[in-house]
Image (cartoon, rainbow, N blue to C red):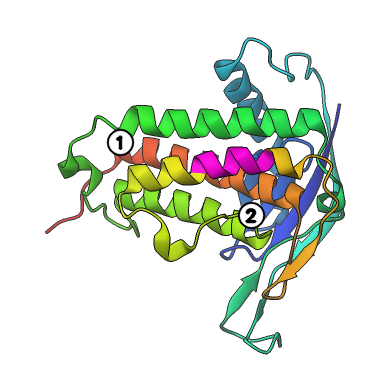
Amino acid sequence: MRIQIGLENGNENRSIAWALDLPGCTACGQDEQEALLAVPLAVVAYQQWVSKHTRDSWLNDLGDFDVRLVEVFNDTTIDQNYDLAEKGYTVNAFFRHDWKPLTRIETRRAAQMLTWINDDLLSVLSDLPDEILDRKYEGERWSIRGILNHVAGANWWYLDRLNLAGIERKDLPQDAFERMRLVQARLLSALGELEGLERVVGVEGELWSPRKLVRRAIWHGRDHSQHIQRLLLTGSPAEK
């Protein structure tokens, strides 16, 4: 199997290798070489993650695979006039692969993976006391509740890029769990509208498409799900 890689440089001062045909499968590094070297282990971990959630894994026969770099995108920062700037909005990767409309099987698999991420998060966090949900951790930007809020907010933002959010951001529930459930429902509903849709739009100087939305949403959800698990297993609260 050939694993096509889109390499994104400059994302939060790191490189991200995106496995373009495996939405949500990424490897990170301090530079291009480090990110690319991490791809094989990331693919195996991704296969294990899918197999953990379904007996009907589409990656059971992954076998030997060949990693191929097919495109490189360097992130840029622009100001309100869309000119390059040191500070402002960071324009993230849009690969040629992102132009392709999503097939029916791809939208179905995306719905499965987004559901796994959501269920895994809520099943672990819904029974935790406020003391743990709101605990501050050394070196962390958010508490666990804050991370949940961030994931829901990001998914709303991805939908908004394609005018699919269906609700104003100011009207989102304040409660993190309610917000997550509402945005998740809208995200799954929107997938039906994305199948076969040929749409690429520019928003705030950045290109978006249905495939990019799916790619980013699954990656972001997996990333922060693992983030929360690390905090629960090994995190130490910040000193008061």
Three-letter amino acid code of the residue under disc 1: Leu
Question: Which sits in the foreground, 6 or 78?
Answer: 78
Q: Is residue 236 left or right of residue 149?
A: left
Vertical arrangement, residue 201 with respect to residue 196, above or below = below
Q: Residues within 10 Å of mark 1 (few under 14, many from 20)?
A: some
Question: Which sits in the foreground, 104 or 231?
Answer: 104
Secondary structure under the numbered disc 2 in the rendered image = loop
Seen at 58% across and 65% down, the residue is 13
Question: Start and end of the magenta stretch?
Answer: 184-191
Vertical arrangement, residue 150 with respect to residue 186, above or below = below
Seen at 38% across and 40% down, the residue is 228
**Residue 123 at x, y percent in the picture:** 36, 27
Seen at 46% across and 49% down, the residue is 151
Three-letter amino acid code of the residue under disc 2: Leu
**Residue 76 at x, y percent in the picture:** 69, 74
- Say whether marks 2 and 1 touch (CB < 8 Å): no
Q: Residues within 10 Å of mark 2 (few under 14, many from 20)?
A: some
Magenta run includes residue 210 = no
**Residue 69 at x, y percent in the picture:** 84, 47
**Residue 145 at x, y percent in the picture:** 31, 48
Label at residue 164:
2
Seen at 30% across and 36% down, the residue is 232
